Image: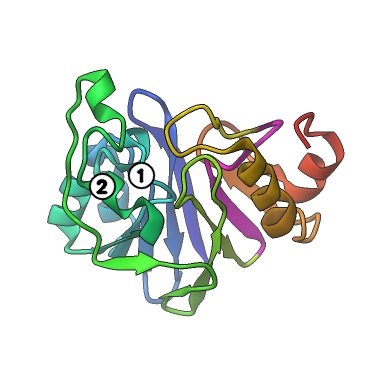
Amino acid sequence: MYFKWFPVGPLQANCYLIGCDETREVAVVDPGGDADKILRQVAADSLKVKYVINTHGHADHIAANKEVLKKTGAALLVHKDDAEMLTSSHRNLSALAGWNLAGRSADRLLQDGDVINLGSVQLEVLHTPGHTPGGISLLADGLVLTGDTLFAGGIGRTDLPGGSFTQLIESIRKKLLTLDDEIKVYPGHGPMSTIGEERASNPFL
């Protein structure tokens, strides 16, 4: 499996490139800024970007959608409950920061249990609401991309519009803590962890 990640944008959201080593088909997950940086990595590794996937619709995770989509011809995927955030600067909160970011609609609306195919690699969609209504995590072989649901030693904010602390904790307990301890956790911001580490030491859990 091909897998690389790096922080992008003013809020240093983690952007992930994940896909098939053989076919070079990949998804760009959460292009939250620095489109040139993302596209340089795509070119350097001779990747074919099949999808852009947003784990949720906040501005710091979607800011480079437009440019990456334009340059790669990829399809845009987001959970159905966050779909309107992609096209509304008020819903994605960019209006509050003066960005006024309103992109195009998604090509595919995701639901819990959906499978995204990238060559021989499969990403399973886990609906993990709480930070936003349509927040998702993406489960692959040996790892899970958790967006702003679960962090190393922390959890996502629930004080923003559409957030719910009760829902977030339920998502983590039912969808993430049921995974094997060895599964690596790659969050929307900050360092990686494992399910076992978060189960044992995350103070919010």
Q: Secondary structure at mark 1?
A: loop
Return the mark for residue 172: none
Q: Amino acid at mark 2?
A: Leu
Quadrant (top left, top right, bottom left, bottom right) of the C terminus: top right
Extreme residue toward the top, this view: 97
Indicate whether residue 150 is drawn in magenta.
yes
Q: Viewed as shown, does residue 62 lie left or right of 146?
A: left
Dominant secondary-structure state across the stretch colored magenta: strand
The quadrant in which residue 20 appears is: bottom left
Q: Viewed as shown, does residue 117 lie left or right of 173?
A: left
Q: Residue 73, image x and y in percent?
A: 16, 63
Which residue has dot 2 on it?
Answer: 86
Q: Residue 59, image x and y in percent?
A: 31, 35
Residue at 22% x, 26% y: name it.
Answer: 95
Q: Residue 64, image x and y in percent?
A: 24, 41
Q: Residue 151, image x and y in percent?
A: 63, 36
Q: Are marks 2 and 1 in contact (CB under 8 Å)?
A: yes
Colour scheme shown = rainbow
Which range of residues does the magenta coloring cover?
142-154
Can the viewer see residue 136 in this picture?
A: yes
Extreme residue toward the left, this view: 70
- On screen, residue 23 above or below 91: below
Which residue has dot 1 on it?
Answer: 57
Residue at 25% x, 54% y: name it.
Answer: 43
Can the viewer see residue 79 in this picture?
A: no
Closer to the chain start, of discs 2 and 1, is 1
Q: Rounded to the nearest whole Å, what is the CA distance between mark 2 and mark 1?
A: 6 Å
Residue at 45% x, 69% y: name it.
Answer: 21
